[in-house]
Amino acid sequence: MNNFVFHNPVKVIFGSGSISQLGKEVSAWGDSALLVTGKCAIKRNGVYQQVADSLNRAGITFLEHDGVSANPLLSHVRAGIEKARTADCSVILGVGGGSVIDTAKAIGAGIPAAHDVWKYFTGKKSVQSTVPVICVPTVAGAGSEMNSGMVLTHDEKRYKFGFAHRYLFPKVCIADPAATLSLSAAQTAYGAIDTITHCLEAYFTSALDNGPFQYGFMETIFNTVIETSLRLVHHPDLLEDRSTMLWTGCLALSGIATAGLGKISFPMHLIEHALSARLDVPHGAGLAAVIPGFSLYQQNLLQPRLARLGRKVFGLAGHDEKQVASEAIGSLQQFIASLGCPNSLKDLGVSRKDFQQLTDHCLVQAQIWRMREYDRAKISSVLDYCYNP
């Protein structure tokens, strides 16, 4: 195991009915909040009213900033920063999925900055301070509620970049699984894909072979998500399964599983960010379309890792590592298809004519993320494998 520093300061209040504690938690950090939300889902399912009631009981004044899109936009963040500055909001409150929470983080980090918030995402500036962020996740999978990362899309340049910093951890996460009961089958499936991808990328890219706890932890998440999500897409009102999905989504990208693994990278997110930015693809759908092809591209290099995944997660048997590794990729494809998600870029409606702009996007993000091995030739090869694995 490699040496590491683990730092995760997020206070998590988990359980049905926990939204009622929101006002009390916000009041510990201030008396006025910018309430960042999506378009209208939380008003339909009753979550908005629960949030408003709790804030009102605690005497918290709040200003709404709704309309966050599935791939959150820089222009919307900039508007939120100005709105929060004008109202002198002391807390940024994100209630929604990962896009909403990422938007809240970007607004919180942008308020005290003397520069444009986009400079964080291009690596030109680092966070020096942030307005406290408190979140209520209503979608399981993104994990933003319990980590230090955020992702944003530049409207004009059509770049979707990710950025992480220790100051970006939310102060509090109110995780109420009942708030996820109204998710559609597609949203549930995309969240499941997001969760397993967060583990798969660490599983595939770590140079450490002997990490029994870390790999076992991720395999448990794989098994749990597969079993639970397959039930939920057909029976969405199972509260215990919603609880399980929400908590595994929180943990998958919290840093716990990867502590001690050394350097890891996010090559599947590298490809997916290009898909979302240039073709406006839902994040989970884009990841689903990339997983099989990327696994095939890396099959020879990752053969022992893939064979272990096949045995531990999919119950595959046999002594031929190459065969088991190949069957593991097939099992991944079958799971993705069983959730109703695309299995390839072709399934997603991507044309080979799109490869040039996708590659261009990946090259810029790879440079910022210091993934130097991902040059034009390698990215093009990965896209070829992902097109129709």
Image (cartoon, rainbow, N blue to C red):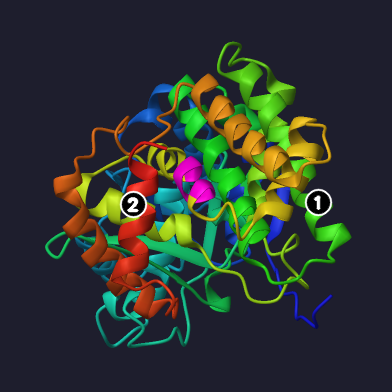
| Residue 176 percent coordinates (x, y) | 64, 36
Say which element carries label 1: helix
Q: Position of residue 7 (x, y in %)?
A: 72, 74
Q: Is residue 161 left or right of residue 232?
A: left
Observer able to see residue 296: yes
* Residue 321 located within the stretch drawn in magenta: no
Q: Residue at x 37, y 82 (%)?
A: 112
Residue 335: image quadrant is top right
Q: Nearer the viewer, residue 166 or 11?
A: 166
Residue topped by disc 1 = 217
Secondary structure of the residue carrying tag 2 is helix
| Left or right: residue 257 compared with residue 192 | right
Image: 286 above or below 102: above
**Front disc: 1 or 2:** 2
Residue 238: image location, x then y, percent = 68, 17
Task: Find the residue positioned furthest to the right.
Answer: 212
Residue range corresponding to the magenta coloring: 291-296
Instruction: Tell me the residue that label 2 is attached to.
Output: 383
Up/down of 5 relative to 87, above or below: below
Precedes in sequence: disc 1 or disc 2 = 1
Which residue is at a point 44% across and 63% down the rendered structure image?
A: 150
